Amino acid sequence: MEHRIVGPGPYRATKLWNETVELFRARMPLRKHRCRFKSYERCFTAAEAVDWLHELLRCSQNFGPEVTRKQTVQLLKKFLKNHVIEDIKGKWGQEDFDDNRHLYRFPPSSPLKPYPKKPPYQKDVIKFPEWNDLPPGTSQENIPVRPVVMNSEMWYKRHSIAIGEVPACRLVYRRQLTEAHVEEIWKSMTLAYLQKILGLDSLEEILDIKLVNSKFIIHNVYSVSKQGFVILDDKSRPNCSDLKQPMYLGFEKDVFKTIADYYGHLKEPLLTFHLFDAFVSVLGLLQKEKMAIEAFQICCLLLPPENRRKLQLLMRMMARICLNKEMPPLCDGFGTRTLMVQTFSRCILCSKDEVDLDELLAARLVTFLMDNYQEILKVPMALQTSIEERVAHLRRVQIKYPGADMDITLSAPSFCRQISPEEFEYQRAYGSQEPLAALLEEVITDTKLSNKEKKKKLKQFQKSYPEVYQERFPTPESEALLFPEKPKPKPQLLMWALKNPFQPFQRTRSFRM
């Protein structure tokens, strides 16, 4: 019973529904049953369906082992309502499914849910002030943008400081960024960061970008207490931390019930209706825990500050209750962790429209939040630093040198591309080899130099630029060809050079006996 992992992306809840329906219809065991003296082929009891589907969901990485039998019964009720199954008399459309011996069967066809289509989103682009923007009220003819050819003269003018000549320059100030510009930077870069983590081509199908409030993002980043909780602008709410509550038997249960009733009567879940698809999409990254935490961090920044603060307080309470071993049991039928998930999952995540798997998805999300809430509800420092550096860069001034005005036709200032240290070392080592190789050839082909002078210069060149020299003379034989040795005449044997040329041969005494 393998359940295919559905990754992040649009319509993930619908994909999970179709995937579960297909597996249930294809692999649910069917057999012959008798009911009221009559036999029915290829059917199953309600209890058998609950057993099989519960095991499928618990073993699936899309839902996890936290799925309860009660949630499985709720899902089968929705199967009956949507005609995924029917009773043996052909009745369906009502959620009157119970965990009993009632017989059910599959209809001849079970249509899968289609994917909804959303109209394309037209983004209102906010133009940022450029270096050469004219003052308001003036106009300029449209000049076609052409690439700037970096010739030697322009290169000299731009890099004259490096050779010791500093020409006159002037500071060009960019027009001041407005608050709307800064808010747009925060919104666009935050959404781009989320899109990159999810690996999607667009966020339009999982998020209504028009509903994303940039003021919420900025408030959630900067208006934070030392404990990490969001500070609200409205401070007129009563603070009950100093009130002494009476302690009595069952006090913890009454407090828990009061908190559960408060969150259960919220008009909207804490993660809001319009962010439902975004959070469900991030659930597809739970196999990659680090990426999932980063994606949840970004999504939680999009929440209204009041919702984010309530979520922080609720998750801290749930985690502390689960870790408190001295806490008396709050419910006789469930464990503490299961009770927390079942009680608060729907007030944290649910869809405005009825979604068939929202209860299972909400339980999966709340379980992950409880285990990682301290990391998820922190401000992502990498994103904050990146945006602050971007805003600071746009507020800097630009230095202009004489002769550099030909950049005025560019639509935006160009920036240097940052390279890695390895690439820098490679460019430093091999970027100037062509002129050095040409210089080496000039030394080799210079006929005015004697062989002694030429050898001396080549030795110096080899010591200074061994890579270029090695490329020109890869072997000692190739180097020897440059200075061919002249054949030396063989010296004649002179008679007077011998010590005793005519000394007679002397017999030696034989050792043989």
Image (spheres, rainbow, N blue to C red):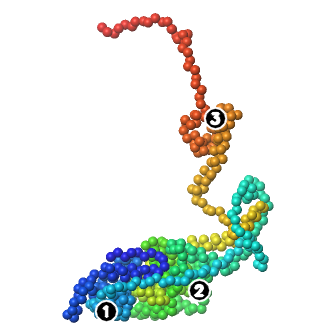
Q: Which amino acid does label 1 sit on?
A: Gly
Query: Looking at the picture, how far across and down is residue 462, in whole percent?
Result: 61, 41
Furthest-front residue in this view: 108
- Residue position for label 2: 232
Q: Which residue is located at x 51 percent, y 90 percent?
A: 268
Front residue (pair 117, 390): 117
Whether residue 374 appears in this view of the structure is no
Q: Which mark is residue 90?
A: 1
Question: Could you tell which of marks 1 and 2 lies nearer the N-terminus?
Answer: 1
Between residues 179 and 25, which one lies in front from this camera angle?
25
Amino acid type for the residue under numbered disc 3: Lys
Q: Which amino acid does label 2 sit on?
A: Leu
**Left or right of 407 in this view: 509:** left
What residue is shown with label 3?
Answer: 455
Q: Which quadrant holds the C terminus? A: top left
Q: Is residue 125 above or below residue 402?
A: below
Give residue 121's position: percent from left, percent from top.
57, 81
Residue 324 picture location, percent across and down: 41, 82
User: In terms of secondary structure, where does tag 3 sit?
Assistant: helix
Answer with the quarter of the image where residue 33 lies: bottom left
Question: Image check: 144 left or right of 83?
Answer: right
Residue occupying the point 50% across, 83% down: 117
Give the CA distance from mark 1 to mark 2: 56 Å
Q: Alpha-carbon distance for marks 1 and 3? A: 102 Å
Circle count: 3
**Are dots 1 and 2 in contact, CB under 8 Å?**
no
Q: Which of marks 1 and 2 is in front?
A: 1
Mark 1, secondary structure of its residue: loop
Label 1 CA crowd tier, 10 Å (few <14, some 14–19, many 20+): few
